[in-house]
Image: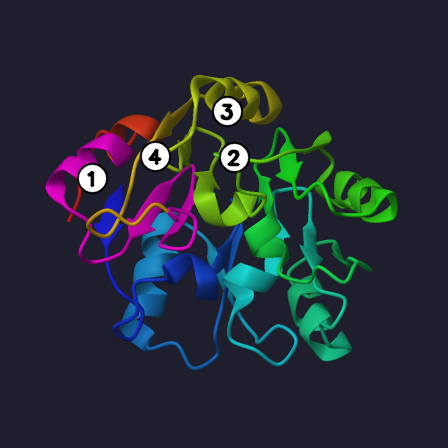
Amino acid sequence: MIKRANLAGNPNLGVYVATTEKLAIVPPTLEEAMMDLIEKSLGVELVKTPISGSNLAGALVCGNSGGIVVSRYAFDREIEVIRDYGVDVERIPDRLTALGNIVLANDFGAIVNPSLSDKSVDLIAEVLDVEVVRGSIANFTITGSVATATNKGVLMHPSSSQDDIKFVENTLKTPADIGTVNKGTPLVGACTIANSKGIIVSLDTTGPELARIEEAFGFLEGYE
């Protein structure tokens, strides 16, 4: 299922909302209609909490069905809120705190910023229970911003090369394709929230873009 929406007029859905197969971490102030759309479209439980006192959960959190990693500045009470849903949550000690921007993961693998320390890479691998590989996509190390990954497909920055696509497919063990959102925005990870059950893209995403997204993620039911 593909849906189009903005978050209080903002197209950067993936900056504010972090998703897995089971959960979506959303700002506590998110309007009820958007919460309902996320819950029904992605088939997830909603976790309403800031991260590090910020509403930018999508930028500061990365997770999959194995667990969730957060910024080292996340507060204890925020982590406990997430753990109450039966999820393993751990802080990453690095100075690089925008984990949602620098980690691209699904249930089969993860691609992380090459600058992350060995300790952080090992911790991500342990919490997410996947192989973690350092790398870039289209020469960007913000892998979580320039791509969106689910267990069914990956949508990548339009400048991604064939080598980039093969690298992502081999690491995340799922088909990948290039595309844009929101009338040509290449930072597809910043403007989408998705899992294997659904995807929500920014409101100005065009028909041709939606067709590419539908193909990349295997959603054949159509879009609204």
Was residue 131 drawn as part of the magenta stretch in this picture?
A: no
Mark 3: few, some, or many residues within 10 Å (few <14, many ≥20)? many
Q: Secondary structure at mark 4?
A: loop
Q: Which label's residue is closer to the chain start, 2 or 3?
A: 2
Q: Residues within 10 Å of mark 2 (few under 14, many from 20)?
A: many
Colour setting: rainbow
Q: Secondary structure at mark 3?
A: helix
Q: Which mark is residue 164?
A: 3
34 is higher (above) or lower (below) than 63:
below
From the viewer's perspective, tell me whether residue 148 is left or right of residue 223.
Answer: right
Cα distance, mark 3 to mark 1?
22 Å
Q: Earlier in the sequence, mark 2 or mark 4?
A: 2
> What secondary structure is marked by label 2?
loop
Q: In the image, is residue 198 part of the stretch drawn in magenta? A: yes
Question: Residue at image x 57%, y 76%?
Answer: 50
Q: Depth-wise, is mark 4 or mark 1 nearer the camera?
A: 4
Q: CA distance from mark 3 to mark 4?
A: 11 Å
Against 29, residue 136 (above or below) is above
Q: Which residue is mark 4?
A: 158
| Magenta residues, start to end | 187-213
Amino acid type assigned to the residue bearing label 1 in the image: Leu
Distance between the alpha carbons at the discs numbered 2 and 4:
10 Å
* Residue that numbered label 2 is attached to: 137
Label 4 vs 1, first from the N-terminus: 4
Answer left or right for 203 relative to 143. left
Front residue of 72 and 63:
72
| Labels 3 and 4: the sequence-earlier one | 4
Alpha carbon of mark 4 to alpha carbon of mark 1: how far?
A: 14 Å
